[in-house]
Image: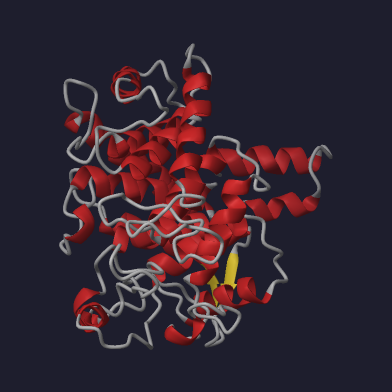
């Protein structure tokens, strides 16, 4: 029997927890054990690929290292005293900037937010608490609000950039960076009433295909899902972009109108999760629309909504957003519109463990967005599995 299941069962028997708490255990015993073994094998693989300076795949900055540290520290038998964790934390902290950013000169929001989530798991090292506060402030300052865009236009509530976060080099925000920012802020203890969450909510909802989206809803397929961004770049402000409609980018650059943008899985789960993090009322129609998309498009075989040639792109990122979103939603089962009653956590564990390679790693042959890097993809797989076990 699963150790966690035994602890919860004992707590119910002696009256510490109500019977309803039993619902917190989503995995059956066989899937729990499979996930546990797969995570151990994945971590063993990563111990063998860590660089001498404590990093993993440092080219984009410390983010991948931070993802791996987070996964390791989410294991009950691994602490900050672990030598690999100690080396990695030293590396991450070496990237702290005086202004609060944690990066290596690029992808500032992405790196800082993911590092913030890792450092939020560290409670026994002096100075880390101060780093967390500064990183939170840094991310809030990076978020688009009360600045001017590249053309000098004020980014106020009516601006398509408002509330979003981005990589920086595109000169515009996107939903992926925005949800990563919210993840880091939430993991580090920032309340959903903080203005950063409420500003982000404006941007997130502008990326949704919903008739409640009065800014861009008529340009997006109104199926409740989400697209990537409200602007293609700094020059095409207010012309939304979907990775599921790549043909529309060229159309827009030629000055032709953009419409019928398709929604897709990784961004829809990211958007849905962010609505939960921002504490949008669960009875809100926009939340219901997003969950309706999930019920209509439930799959773990590919990143749903992407065109057939691209459907495996961002696949492991999709699995992470799938796992974290449904974990945050707090349900064990998804009743799909075709009548199936899906046990999402068991489904995810079965899929992810089947994809693990003999050496304990994972990788994606569709190598867009760095998913050919086994360090990154193994970190994604571990994160997805841990969400199913949460």
Q: Which of 370 and 136 is in front in this view?
A: 136
Residue extending farthest to the front is: 152
User: Would you identify the image quadrant in which residue 335 lies?
Assistant: bottom right
Relative side of 384 to 329, left or right: left
Residue extending farthest to the right is: 15
Q: Which residue appears at 38% of the width and 37% of the height?
A: 112
Relative side of 334 to 386, left or right: right
Considering only vertical position in the picture, is 56 above or below 241?
above
Residue 48, given in percent of the width and then of the height, sits at: 19, 30
Q: Which of 116 and 232 is in front in this view?
A: 232
Considering only vertical position in the picture, is 232 above or below 170?
below
Residue 388, given in percent of the width and then of the height, sits at: 49, 53
Q: Which residue appears at 28% of the width and 67% of the height?
A: 235
Q: Which of 368 and 256 is in front in this view?
A: 256
Q: Which residue appears at 37% of the width and 46% of the height?
A: 382
Q: Can residue 244 be seen in this view?
A: yes
Quadrant where the N terminus sits is: top right
Residue extending farthest to the top is: 126
Q: How many marks?
A: 0
Relative side of 377 to 31, left or right: left
């Amino acid at each position: 029997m699963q150790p966690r299941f035994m602890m919860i069962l004992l707590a119910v028997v002696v009256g510490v927890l109500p019977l309803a708490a039993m619902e917190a255990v989503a995995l059956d015993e066989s899937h729990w054990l499979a996930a546990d073994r797969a995570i151990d094998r994945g971590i063993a693989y990563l111990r063998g690929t860590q660089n001498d300076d404590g990093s993993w795949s440092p080219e984009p900055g410390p983010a991948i290292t931070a993802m791996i540290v987070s996964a390791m520290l989410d294991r009950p038998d691994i602490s900050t005293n672990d030598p690999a964790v100690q080396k990695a934390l030293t590396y991450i902290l070496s990237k702290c900037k005086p202004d609060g950013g944690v990066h290596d000169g690029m992808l500032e929001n992405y790196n800082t937010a993911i590092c913030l989530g890792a450092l939020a798991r560290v409670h026994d090292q002096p100075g880390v608490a101060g780093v967390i506060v500064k990183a939170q402030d840094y991310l809030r300052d990076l978020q688009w609000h009360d600045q001017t865009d590249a053309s000098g236009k004020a980014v106020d509530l009516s601006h398509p950039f408002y509330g979003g976060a981005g990589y920086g080099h595109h000169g515009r925000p996107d939903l992926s960076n925005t949800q990563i920012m919210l993840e880091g802020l939430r993991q580090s203890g920032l309340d959903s009433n903080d203005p950063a969450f409420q500003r982000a909510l404006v941007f997130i909802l502008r990326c949704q295909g919903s008739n409640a989206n009065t800014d861009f809803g008529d340009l997006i397929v109104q199926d409740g899902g989400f697209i990537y961004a409200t602007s293609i770049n700094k020059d095409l402000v207010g012309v939304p972009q979907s990775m599921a409609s790549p043909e529309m980018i060229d159309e827009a650059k030629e000055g032709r109108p953009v419409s019928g943008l398709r929604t897709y899985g990784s961004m829809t789960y990211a958007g849905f999760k962010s609505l939960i993090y921002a504490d949008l009322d669960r009875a809100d129609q926009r939340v219901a629309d997003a969950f309706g998309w999930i019920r209509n498009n439930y799959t773990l075989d590919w990143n749903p909504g992407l065109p057939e040639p691209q459907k495996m792109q961002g696949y492991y990122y999709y699995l992470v957003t799938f796992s974290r979103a449904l974990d945050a939603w707090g349900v064990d089962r998804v009743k799909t519109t075709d009548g199936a009653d899906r046990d999402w956590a068991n489904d995810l564990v079965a899929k992810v463990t089947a994809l693990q390679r003999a050496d304990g790693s994972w990788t994606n042959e569709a190598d867009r967005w760095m998913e050919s890097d086994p360090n990154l993809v193994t970190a994604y797989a571990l994160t997805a599995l841990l969400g199913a076990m949460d």
